[in-house]
Amino acid sequence: EYTDGRVYEGDWADGVKHGKGKLICPDGTVYDGDWEKDRMTGKTHFVNSSGVVYDGDVVDGRMHGKGKLTYPDGRSYEGMWEEDKFIG
């Protein structure tokens, strides 16, 4: 548990998040997936405090690769992403 209220449950290596894990933030935001040297990299399931959901690839915490972003009203974007921008 961090001093700002965030909680991490998962794998560690050399004192940093590394492997599979879930980071839960006080505002309800949840990052669940792959971590590499303290950064979200690989596959993730992300839900922010507004209910926006992302399932897909991330690199250094950014949507990058194939993924789907779904809004609470049902709208969604599925395809390729590059540094948090939809390119498909």
Image (spheres, grey):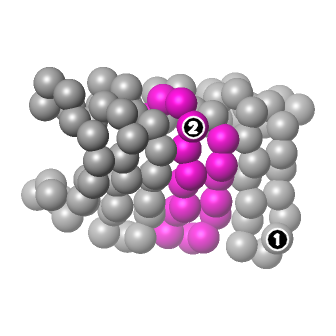
Q: Is residue 8 left or right of residue 85?
A: left
- In magenta, the rendered stretch is 40-56
Mark 2 or mark 1: which comes first in sequence?
2
User: Quick check: is 86 in the magenta stretch?
Assistant: no
Residue labelled with disc 1:
74
Residue at the disc numbered 2: 43
x, y percent for residue 68? 75, 48
Looking at the rendered structure, the secondary structure element under dot 1 is loop
SS assignment for the magenta stretch, majority: strand
Most extreme residue toward the right is: 88
Kind of residue at disc 1 = Gly
Residue 87 figure quarter: top right
Quarter that holds the C terminus: top right
Name which residue type carries label 2: Lys
Looking at the rendering, in which quadrant would you find the N terminus? bottom left
Residue occupying image coordinates x 47% and y 44%: 33
Instruction: Count residues near mark 2 (Cα–Cα under 10 Å), then give few for <14, some for 14-19, many for 20+.
Output: many
- Compared with residue 37, is residue 32 higher up or lower down, i.e. above or below? below
Mark 1 is surrounded, within 10 Å at the Cα level, by few (under 14), some (14 to 19) or many (20 or more) other residues, namely few
Residue 68 in the figure: left or right of residue 43: right
The answer to which of 83 and 16 lies nearer the viewer is 16
Instruction: Point out residue 4 in the picture as x, y percentages from the top left corner.
Output: 17, 59
Q: Residue 5 in the image: state x and y as whole percent.
A: 20, 64
